[in-house]
Image: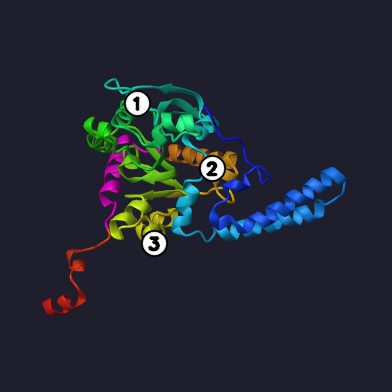
């Protein structure tokens, strides 16, 4: 399976620079010119190159410290961003993949199997988009069919049977809405997963590593701990879809992204997620190895915390966590405009 190799400053391709990263291009071209001259003419430009690298990092940090919601969406969709398969290759040892839902077929958009993270035996449920064109088509660009969610539930039931914790990696634009998918019951499959995950008698950790799109993400997203990578997003609908509904045009996607509150900071503030996993400077695509190390560190810490809790207590906490999700108003009187409250008083 194609995977993303370690990226350094020099091998992040300039053609993949996002629009808001264009100020970095001149700096990088200057560095490339100096390095070429140094190699061809045996001239020493090491001092200038070090200064330019420092300037690059300062500018990169400034850009990424001030990303808008729409820019965060673009980073989450970056073509070089590590995918679920990359994280599995890096942090899961002795991974044994299981296939098929025993009803219709095998959906490659969701990968499931047994493995070890550090010293912890776990079950992995991961949404995988595919790296090259052939794999993307095979994985349906990460948009799972009902058989994918049924396969995930089948493997999660095995995790419960063998008392193994579950780790899910969420990265999907959404479940596939095609005719075949609907005919085979994609809505029912997702609903079934929501119900069953809420009461599985084993710890569950969910991590949004890229796109967390709608019910397609939630279908493997009910857990005791929900984390999100720093430049990932989690939303009930894509910004383009929201803009199409509200403004009848996808050109308002940036405004929709801001209104949806889909960034990691907003989600943490609203208690939709429990933790934000930091990414390397400039996003996970610039240093996949460090991004994977950060994810692994979070999983190990969360697993040890959850395994110390009695299972009945864990289930009650899980239930209460999801019951409270989305609660904003404190009382029914909050619905009443201030003038009406005065009249009633």
Please tell me which residue lies in front, 202 or 267. Answer: 267
Closer to the N terminus: mark 1 or mark 3? Answer: 1
Q: CA distance from mark 3 to mark 2?
A: 31 Å
Which residue was labeled with disc 3? 255
Q: Position of residue 275 (x, y in %)?
A: 44, 49
Contact? badges 3 and 2 (CB < 8 Å): no
Closer to the N terminus: mark 3 or mark 2? Answer: 3
Please say if 252 is above or below 105. Answer: below
Point out the stretch of residues depicted in magenta: 306-327
Question: In the rendered view, does 24 fall on the left or right side of 122?
Answer: right
Check if residue 229 falls in the magenta segment: no
Which of pointers 1 and 3 indicates the residue nearer the eye? 3
Contact? badges 1 and 3 (CB < 8 Å): no
The residue carrying pointer 3 sits among few (fewer than 14), some (14 to 19) or many (20 or more) residues within 10 Å by Cα, namely some
Q: Quadrant of residue 191?
A: top left
Q: Position of residue 88 (x, y in %)?
A: 50, 31
Q: CA distance from mark 1 to mark 3?
A: 39 Å
Which residue was labeled with disc 2? 294
Q: Position of residue 246 (x, y in %)?
A: 29, 59
Pick the quarter of the image with the C terminus: bottom left
Residue 176 seen from this side: yes
Please identify the residue farthest to the top as the structure is shown. Answer: 102
Q: Quadrant of residue 122?
A: top left
Q: Main secondary structure of the magenta part?
A: helix
Q: Judging from the image, what secondary structure is the residue with disc 1 in? A: helix
């Amino acid at each position: 399976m194609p995977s993303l190799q370690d990226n350094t400053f020099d091998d992040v391709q300039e053609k993949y620079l996002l629009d808001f990263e264009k100020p970095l291009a001149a700096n990088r071209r200057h560095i490339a010119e100096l390095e070429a001259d140094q190699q061809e003419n045996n001239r020493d430009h090491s001092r200038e190159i070090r200064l330019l690298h420092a300037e690059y990092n300062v500018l990169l940090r400034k850009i990424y410290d001030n990303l808008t919601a729409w820019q965060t969406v673009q980073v989450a969709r970056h073509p070089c961003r590590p995918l679920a398969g990359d994280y599995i290759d890096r942090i899961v040892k002795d991974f044994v993949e299981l296939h098929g839902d025993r009803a219709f077929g095998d959906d490659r958009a969701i990968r499931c199997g047994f493995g070890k993270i550090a010293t912890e035996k776990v079950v992995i449920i991961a949404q995988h988009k595919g790296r090259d064109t052939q794999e993307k088509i095979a994985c349906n660009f990460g948009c799972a069919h009902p058989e994918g969610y049924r396969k995930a539930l089948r493997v999660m039931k095995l995790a419960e049977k063998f008392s193994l914790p579950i780790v899910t990696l969420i990265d999907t634009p959404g479940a596939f809405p095609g005719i075949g998918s609907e005919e085979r019951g994609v809505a029912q499959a997702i609903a079934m997963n929501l119900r069953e995950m809420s009461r599985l008698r084993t710890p569950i950790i969910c991590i949004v590593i890229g796109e967390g799109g709608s019910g397609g993400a939630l279908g493997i997203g009910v857990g005791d701990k929900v984390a999100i990578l720093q430049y990932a997003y989690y939303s009930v609908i894509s910004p383009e879809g929201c803009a199409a509904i509200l403004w009848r045009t996808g050109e308002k996607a940036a405004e929709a992204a801001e209104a949806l509150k889909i960034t990691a900071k907003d989600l943490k503030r609203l208690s939709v997620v429990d933790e934000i996993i930091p990414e390397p400077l400039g996003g996970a695509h610039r240093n996949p190895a460090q991004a994977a190390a950060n994810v692994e560190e979070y999983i190990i810490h969360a697993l040890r915390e959850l395994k110390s809790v009695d299972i009945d207590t864990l289930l009650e906490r899980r239930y209460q966590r999801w019951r409270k999700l989305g609660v904003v108003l404190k009382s029914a009187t909050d619905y009443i405009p201030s003038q009406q409250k005065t009249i009633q008083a």
